[in-house]
């Protein structure tokens, strides 16, 4: 078993390497002067079970292309099996045609990864579960729920908890967390006029006097979470915490969160935190290194991954 780290999230790769007690494979991943990607694997990988760690986060296209070139290098180096470990799978929000003449980019990216030579994919909290079906190779989709529930118990406690889905589409995800911590469930009826812009319409459920836990998979502009937290506090919530799997946090998102009604936004380190995120007083990243590392170990040993969530 070998672990190869690309450049999008070196910190997480090193933590996974430490958890598994397996050193990172030595590789040279650089750019030519015109930003073409150059890759050279410095170790023998013939017949090896290789895990390539790369989130396709900002800059998404560069990181995706880097992943593809590394996979191709491993395939041509005769690796026995190549697993693309993608903690954050970019382009996942484009999983259907919401309007005429629009792409299904998630399917295109799945095709690219498969054609490059990946034998399987390991990822976490896909934006839409059906994306697993876009691949013609095995896909293991992990869930951040166990990591979140442990942190919720330590940080918020167990009294007067209500888990809130910020939209109807996230109800299944929120319900899974609510079941784990034995909490009530509420739903926010959201209207989205265009990408990146949302408006809270109604709160379905009683949140008065409750500690509310917003659960979502991606926070990008943070407009949805900030609007939701304001609506919950106006409805009488005692406090609002948000737990989100992937902290994209683009543009002015950090400023919005900092000035919002949220007591704390907790994200995982599936995406490398920027300086602004690390300095924000009410944003915190928790590690998924042990979760990803254990899944990688089980894949290598051909044992069950699903029992991680029993």
Image: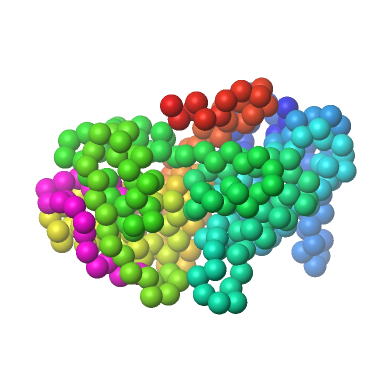
Asked whether 13 falls inside the magenta stretch, the response is no
The percent coordinates of residue 143 (x first, y second) are: 47, 39
- Residue range in magenta is 198-214
> How far from the left and from the top, in percent, is residue 160?
16, 40
Is 232 displayed left or right of 242 in the figure? left
Look at 55% across and 77% down and name the residue there.
100
Q: Nearer the viewer, residue 151 or 298?
A: 298
Residue 49 appears in view: yes
Which of the 4 quarters of the picture holds residue 101? Answer: bottom right
* Total numbered labels: 0
Determine the residue positioned at 49% across, 57% down.
Answer: 248
Picture quarter with the N terminus: top right
Which residue occupies the foreground of this view, 185 or 2? Answer: 185
In the image, residue 296 lies at what x, y percent?
A: 62, 31
> Which x, y percent locates residue 256?
35, 64
Q: Is 213 in front, or is 22?
A: 213
Quadrant for residue 176, please give it: top left
């Amino acid at each position: 078993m070998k672990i190869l780290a690309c450049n999008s999230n070196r910190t997480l790769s090193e933590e996974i390497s430490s958890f598994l007690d397996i050193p990172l494979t030595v590789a040279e991943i650089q750019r030519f002067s015109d930003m073409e990607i150059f890759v050279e694997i410095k170790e023998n990988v013939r017949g090896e079970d290789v895990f390539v760690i790369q989130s396709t986060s900002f800059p998404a296209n560069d990181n995706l292309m880097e992943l593809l070139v590394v996979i191709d290098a491993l395939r041509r180096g005769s690796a026995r099996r190549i697993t693309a470990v993608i903690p954050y799978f970019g382009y996942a929000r484009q999983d259907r045609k919401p309007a005429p003449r629009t792409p299904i980019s998630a399917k295109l990216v799945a095709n690219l990864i498969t054609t490059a030579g990946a034998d399987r994919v390991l990822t976490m909290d896909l934006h839409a579960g059906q994306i697993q079906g876009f691949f013609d190779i095995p896909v293991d989709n992990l869930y951040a729920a166990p990591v979140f529930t442990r942190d919720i118990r330590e940080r918020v406690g167990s009294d007067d908890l209500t888990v809130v889905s910020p939209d109807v589409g996230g109800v299944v995800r929120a319900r899974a967390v609510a079941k784990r911590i034995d909490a009530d469930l509420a739903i926010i009826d959201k209207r989205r006029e265009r990408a990146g812009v949302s408006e809270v319409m109604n709160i379905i459920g009683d949140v008065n006097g409750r500690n509310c836990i917003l659960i979502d998979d991606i926070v990008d502009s943070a407009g949805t979470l900030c609007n939701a937290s304001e609506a919950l506090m106006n409805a009488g919530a005692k406090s609002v915490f948000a737990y989100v799997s992937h902290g994209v946090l683009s543009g002015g998102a950090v400023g919005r969160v900092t000035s919002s009604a949220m007591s704390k936004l907790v994200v995982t380190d599936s995406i490398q935190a920027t300086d602004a995120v690390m300095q924000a007083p009410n944003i915190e990243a928790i590690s998924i290194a042990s979760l990803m590392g254990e899944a990688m170990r089980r894949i290598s040993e051909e044992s069950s991954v699903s029992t991680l969530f029993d």
